[in-house]
Image: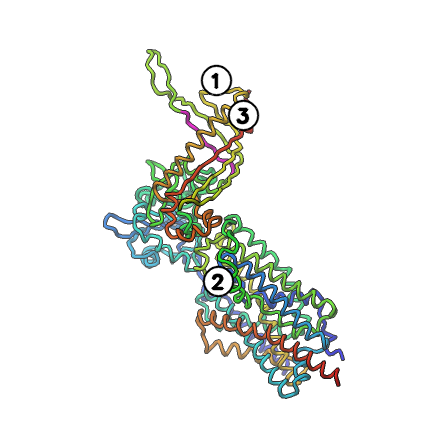
Amino acid sequence: MKKYALNDITFFQYIFMIHGSQLGFGLLSLPADLAKSAGTDGWISLLFGWLLAILGSLITLQVMKKHPDLTVYDLLPRYFGRVLGAVMNVCLIGYFLLGFFIAFSALIGFFKVELLSNTPNFLMVLLFLLPTYNLARNQVRILGRYAEISFWGFLWLSLVYLYPLKDSHWIHMLPILKEGWGPVLHGIKTTGIAFLGFEISLVLYPFLKHKEKAAAGIIIGNSITLVMYMIVTVVSFLFFSPDDLLSYEFPTLKVLKVMEFRFLERVEIVVLVAYVFLSIRVWTHYLFAATFGISRLLGKQDHKLFVKLVSIGTLLTYIFYKPSFHEMGNMLGMFGHLGWVTAFVFPCFLLAYTSIIRRKEGGR
Amino acid sequence: MNRFCQAVLVILIALGMALLPGCYDQMNLEDASIALMLGLDVDNNGQFLVYTQSPVFSREAKEKTETVMVTADSIRLSRAKFDAVFTGITTGGKLQTILIGKRLLQKKEWFTLFDMFYRVPKLTETPRAVVVDGSVKDIFEFKPGDKPRLSLHMSKLIDTANMSDITVLTNLQELRRQMKEKGMTPSLSLIKKGKDDVLVTGTALINKKNTFAGQLSLQESTLLLILQNQINGVPSLVLDFGPAKEEEDGGNETEATVKNVIAIDITSYKRKVHTGFSNGKFSFHVDLHFNIVITTLQRMDSMSKREDKPAIERMITSALTKDIDALISKCQRASVDPFGFGLYARAYQYKSWKSVQNEWDKAFAEAEVGVHVKTSIKSFGVLE
C-alpha cells in the first residue's frame, strides 16, 4: 500500500527539507542566546545541541521505520485507536500550526524592527502570506524542490560572514571552558529552538524514495544546520567583545553592519531580505505539516483548502492582534520548550510504546 | 462565469500588489538631507553643540554643502532643529565621519550620546569617530579650495592616514567594542585644524573613566598599531640617533640640520605575547620580530657597508626597544591600555583576571611589561 509513492522526494530534497525546517527560528539571536548562558564557550553548547538533535532524529526514524508507508497521522490512530489517535493528531496539528504562526510572526517582527518600521503589520503579513500560500498548497515534492534550490541559491550568504572576520579577535575564545562545564550544559537549553524542525520527518519519512538512506540524510541535514549556526556564532564571538555581546538583540545582523564597499553600504539589509527566502521554508514546512494533518484527519485527499483557511485566519488574526516585539520573543521561548517535548519526548514515548505493543503481539 | 471570477481575482491581486511595496517607509532623495559629517562639541558654558554638514544637490545653489550648528540636549533632539533649517529631512544613514571635540571628551558621560547609533537599525555603524584637538566649529567652517567636499575629504584623510599607519581607524562599532571591553581602553584618531588645512596629529587615548587621557604622536601611533597587531601594509619608522654636531666655519658646534637618522620599512613582523601572573601583578612579555628594509642611512657614512649589518641591527633594535618601552610606560602612567593586554590577561590568566577585571586600568598600570625586540635586515636597498 504505497499511498505516497507518486509524491516521493529524493535524498537531497529530504536533506534540505530537514535543514530548511531548522534554519530560521534562532539564527538571528542565536549568538546572544548562547553567550547569555555559556559566554564564549557557547559554541560547545551548540555542538551538544546538535548531538541531541541527531539523537532525537534517529529515534524518530526508528519509530517511522516500522511502518515505512505511513505518516505519523496514520500511525497514531493505528496504535492508539480512533478516538485517542485523533486527539493526539489534533495536538500534533496544533503544534505545527503554532510553529507556523510563531516562525511567521517572528520574521514579521524582525522586519518591523529592522527594515519597515512604518508599514502596518497586515500589509507585511499579506506580502509574506502570498508566496507562502503558493508554496504550501503544493505537494511535498514541490516543497522539496524549493528547499533544495533555495539552499544552493543562497549559499553565498555564508560567504558574507567571512567579511567581518577581518576585525576578528581569536583571543576572545580563550580560555576554553572558562567557567567549567556547568554554563556549557546550561547553554544547551537555548539551542533547542535552533535545532527544532527535524520533527518534520514524522511527516516526511513516507515520502522519501530511498528509505535506507533516511538516517544518513537526517544526519547530513542536521550537520548543515550546525555548520550554518557555527559560522554565525563563531563570527559573532570573534567580532564582538564578550563584555558587549549580550547587549545586542540580533548579533547575527549587527555583525554585518560594518560591511562597507564603495558601491554598497548596509549589507545587512540585503542579507535580511535574502534570509526571508530561507526562513520561508520553516513556516511553509510547518504549515504543510499541519494542513496535511488536517486533511488526513478529515479523510480529505487535498490539503489546499486548509492552507487557504489557515492563511486567511492568519491575516485576520494580524488585523486584530498586534504583538509587541517582546511578546514575540516570549512566544519563541515558549515554543522552544514545547518543541523539546514534541521533538524528543514524543518520539521516545512512541518508540517505547510501539516496541512493547510489538512484543506483546509477538508473544501472542 | 468562471472566467469572470478569474478576472476579478487578477484585478484584486493587482490592486493588492500595488499596496504591497514599502510605501510607508519610502523616502525620496529630493526630500532627504543626507548628513555626511556630524560634529559634537561643548561650548564655554557647557552647552552641548551639534554640527552637521550635508551636500546640496541643486544647480542653483552656489555652495554645494550646507552646514548647520544647533544647541541640543541629545543628538536625536538636534535632528528636529536641523529639520527646521535644512531643505530636506535629515537622515543619518550615510554618515561618514563623526567629529568629537576634545572638550566634550572631558565629560564623563559623553559616550551615552552615541546610544542612538547602536539602537536605531537605520543608522550606520561605519562612520569614523575622530577627536578634534580644538574647536569642532573651526573644522566645520573650513572651506578648502584645493580639496573635495570637506566631509568626504575628512573620511578620506582618516582612511589614508590609517593606511600609512600613522593613526588608528576607529569606527562606531569598534569604538563601542573598545569602550565596553573590560580589558582595553579606546584609542581614536586625532585631528587638528592647521592654518589652511586639517591635519592628523596622531591618536587620542581615552581612559576607563571615559575621559581624554593623552595623545600619541604619529610615530607612537605606528608603534601602537604594531602592538595592537593592526598594521596595514608596510609601516615606516624613522629612528633618530641623537643630535649630530656640525662644525661651522668658525669652529662653533651647532645642531645639525641633517641629523643622524635611520629610516626603515617594516615589511613583516611577528608579535607574541607571554602572559604571567605573580605576586599580585600581571606580567607581559612581548616578543617582536621585525623584518625590515633600510630606506635611509643619513649621516651614517661610516656604517654603510654590508659588513656592518649586525651593528646596524643592534642599533635599530635598541632604538626600537627604547621607543616601545617609552610608549608603554607612558600609557601605564596614564592608566590606559590601548594595546588590549587585558584580553591576554583574560585568555591566559583567567582566575587572576576575574578579580581585577573591573579595574583593569589600575592593574595594568602596575603590571610589568617587557619588550624583546629582534630585527633582521632583509635589504639595504640597491646601493652598495
- Element on which disc 2 rests: helix
Between the C-alphas of marks 2 and 3, the distance is 55 Å
| Residue B343 percent coordinates (x, y) | 46, 48
| Residue that sits furthest to the top in the current view | B250
Which chain is home to disc 3?
B
- In x, y percent, where is residue B344? 47, 47
Q: Residue at image x 41%, y 60%?
A: B119
Q: Nearer the viewer, residue B99 or A290?
A: A290
Residue corresponding to mark 1? B302
**Which amino acid does the dot numbered 1 rest on?**
Ser
For the point 62% across and 73% down, which residue is it?
A: A136
Rendered image: mark on residue B371: none
Residue at the far left: name it.
B45
Q: Nearer the viewer, residue A320 or A148?
A: A148
Which range of residues does the magenta coloring cover?
A: B233-241
Q: Nearer the viewer, mark 3 or mark 1?
A: 1
